[in-house]
Amino acid sequence: MPESIPASLIIDTLKDTFREARAARTAEGWGRPATDHLGWILSVPDTHQKSVLAALDKEEAIRVLTCATEDEAATIAAGLYTGGEPVVLMIQHAGLYASVNTLRGVSMDGKVPVFYMIGLLSREKDKDLKDSRHSMVRFAEPLLDTFGVPHARLEGPDDVHLIPEYYRLSRQRRGPAAVLVGLETI
Amino acid sequence: MAMKPAEVLKVIAAARGNAICVPTMTTSPAWRELAPDDLSVGCVGFMGGASSLGLGLALSRPERRVVVFDGDGSLLMQLGSLATIAGARPRNLVHLLFKNGVYHTSGSQEIPGGLTVDFVTMARGAGYRTALSIGELDEFKRRFPQMLKEEGPIFAELHTTLADQTPMTARGGVAFPDQIDRLRKKLLTSAA
């Protein structure tokens, strides 16, 4: 059975992910960062990950920028990447559906690494995604498969290692990669 | 009065210094001739994204100016970016809007509201530090160097004629992924 993941665990994992990204940036030849935080979260607020977003409000090491749309978030991510900044998108499955052309144009055809954390609002604890009563839940993985976006499920605290793995994967393949947050974070 | 886009771009090219430039749609063909190998990246393949691409660049490189050459039809596709930009408060972002009232590239269909849409009021209402309208080239020549020094975000609605070329009549240029690579390497080298 899936379990909810504590916000503190996700934030610690994001910090580690950003630290690793900063080290890779230094190895690539970038000088001292132009900014004084570890990395950026671009968010279009997601009910499913609201405990993480609330906790991030108190975090000085991670800068959060709330965007009006997911199209903006993915495109701002391209600008941050080009300028050498580590960035993670936190959105909801409905936002993924709303921003498919930007996913294609910026990250796939544009070959910009974009790592998504996608909340599966309304996902039932006792059902597999494909058996959900909610189309928003059922279509997330098939959509990502259709576009060839590698993805994994965060089904509990033991899965947070997938965050840095899929972040790294987005950089290695120069394209999108995603983790799906199975249950509402706590 | 309305300005010729190519004349506006010449003014920008002469004054921009080491600013990163983000052209989109009908400013792209003329800009790549004026500035073929420099700190620019065109918004190609995701119409409406120029302002957001510029915001990301501005936040990542606060020591540089970033100048976005947006279009009115393009901005309408991501109009919420005005609020996102204002909320992020990038001091180094100059957002220029080439306003011609039509979707020139796709056949000059009128944009919703045509030329009556008041983007200056929208930008000001969203929270840009400065928002103004310019219809004369001499005024733009006078104001643009100041925009490169003043605290942003700055929005300028430029009343322009249609461009001589569009991305459909003048295809080509460097592919977007290669533009990203090229700009990233230049920023890396300058930041090292």
Image (tube, rainbow, N blue to C red):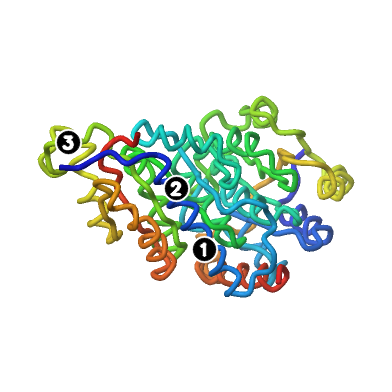
Q: Mark 2 points at which residue?
A: A89
Amino acid, disc 2: Leu
Q: Using the image, tell me which numbered label, if any, was put on residue A21.
A: 1
Proximity of marks 3 and 1: CB atoms separated by less than 8 Å: no
Q: Can you say which quadrant of the picture contains the N terminus of chain B?
A: top right
The residue carrying pointer 3 sits among few (fewer than 14), some (14 to 19) or many (20 or more) residues within 10 Å by Cα, namely: some
Proximity of marks 1 and 2: CB atoms separated by less than 8 Å: no
Looking at the image, which is closer to me, A130 or B161?
A130
Q: Is residue B14 visible?
A: yes
Q: Name the residue under label 3.
A: A125
Please tell me which of labels 2 and 3 falls first in the chain: 2
Q: Tell me: B163 left or right of B12.
A: left
Please tell me which of labels 1 and 2 falls first in the chain: 1
Q: What element carries label 2?
A: strand
Q: Which residue is drawn at 10% across and 40% down?
A: A131
Q: Can you say which quadrant of the picture contains the C terminus of chain B?
A: bottom right
